[in-house]
Amino acid sequence: MTKQGGKRRLGIGGYSAPAGLSWRDAAGAATAAGLAVVLALAPLSWGILIVGGALAVGITLIRPALGLGFLALLVPFGSLREVPLGPASVGLAEFYALFVIAAWCMYMVAWRRVWMAPSRLWPLFGLLVAAMLVSITQALSLSYAVKELSKWLEFGAVMLCAASLPNAGERKVVLGASLTAGIAAALLGWYQFLRGVGPEGFILFGRFMRAYGTFRQPNPYAGYLGIILPAALALIISYWPWRAGASWGERVLWLLGAAGVLTMGPAMLMSWSRGGWFGAAAAVLTVLVLRGRRAAFLTMLAVLVLAGVFIVMELGRVLPASLVLRVTDFTDYFTLGDVSDVVPTPANWAVVERLAHWQAAERMFSEHPWLGVGIGNYEPVYPAYRLPRWPEPLGHAHNYYLNIAAETGLFGALAYVLFWAGAAWQAW
């Protein structure tokens, strides 16, 4: 290193850098040059991914709160790029969630300040995690247990970051990103439904296809939309954006909410997921009821009117028989009972398959009522509890309450119910 004109200069192999250039500047220039070479040689899709990823990483390091917005955009599309890791595959969303958590921690260390919103949920979440940890003592597969436990810990960390967002502006950014992701997922479902894109088992009426997005199955796809749709509805009924004094950000957010309702509502129907329909309907009703007493009365009145219209149209054979059957055949879950000896047919397959997995979970709980078979271990122990005609574990019991009871026992099931009851109470 030499001095010239009162300024330091870097000497590398006889080369003298311009005055005032530091090692950090040189490293940045070298990185930019390397990135330019990679972008020039990489395919267009990879180039877009690299540039977008670099921008997201940079913004997240500067403002970790905004990283939650990028994470929301990745959630419905994170499975497009996955890396096998033990018994699981890890997608972009999981990797980015870990990065957001790390960036948040680094941000707090740098500012020497801890952002942690006080909440009664944290002790309840800690109780749930404790029940899961204790259940590991019963686990047949430690790798499956660690995989599932890591999901819950990641969920808790992201929940903590989201609850600790420092200002309303950043919360609106995250909400807008979630709505944008929901709209994109819904439009993908529209394309699959109308263009008939998907596996043969998803064909509807001989010409359409059940919408499934990037989730590989219609049910989790509908479940994802069922989370975003009520938020979109709550947004558009909470205020009118063209009132005096409304900001452009509020107007954009309201328009995203309206677009979300118009796209995600039909996409829910296109998924043909009865569980998704019922869940979304319950969530929408909750949103409307919580608007106040008058809104609650009008909502209940509307429900009664719609139920009456449905009954009249069914009696008059106006509604498609397939739709009526899809909505009403859930009663079979309460009338079939033990399905050990039931022969599956195309007509009863969906119902009997679910009941078979429910019974397997019930058997697990009966033999391990206190601590369960171990968190995440439904699949490894399934062969010992399955019904004769149902060898495939599917990875879950088709009912998460039964699933969590089978894996973590009575203590875990109670902790799970308490956690979500606490979340509902806090939201109220």
Image (cartoon, helix red, strand yellow):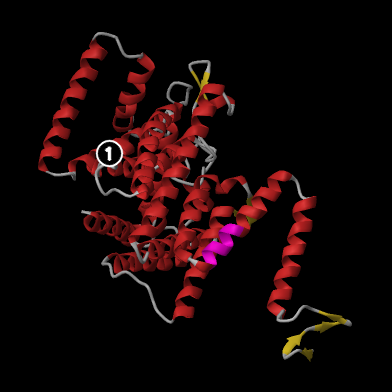
Residues 289 and 21: in front is 21
Q: Is residue 47 above or below residue 59?
A: above
Residues 300 and 83: in front is 300
Regarding residue 137, the answer to whether it shows in the image is: yes
Residue 80, given in percent of the width and then of the height, sits at 61, 45
| Residue found at the far front of this picture | 5
Left or right: residue 377 compared with residue 279:
right
Residues 21 and 135: in front is 21
Residue located at (28% from left, 67% from top): 119
- Residue 50 falls in image quadrant: bottom right
Left or right: residue 156 compared with residue 28:
left
| Residue found at the far right of this picture | 14
Q: In this view, does 130 lie above or below 416?
A: below
Circle 1 SS class: helix
Q: In this view, does 82 lie above or below 163?
A: above
Residue located at (74% from left, 75% from top): 26
Number of numbered tags placed on the structure image: 1
Tell me the magenta residue range.
Answer: 55-61
Is residue 276 shown in magenta?
A: no
- Residue 263 falls in image quadrant: top left
Neighbour class for label 1 at 10 Å: few (<14), some, many (≥20)? many
- Residue 124 falls in image quadrant: bottom left
Residue under numbered circle 1 = 284
Residue located at (41% from left, 40% from top): 225
Residue 150, given in percent of the width and then of the height, sits at 49, 63
Magenta highlight: main SS: helix
Residue 273, given in percent of the width and then of the height, sits at 41, 31
Left or right: residue 27 compared with residue 129:
right
The kind of residue on which mark 1 rests is: Val
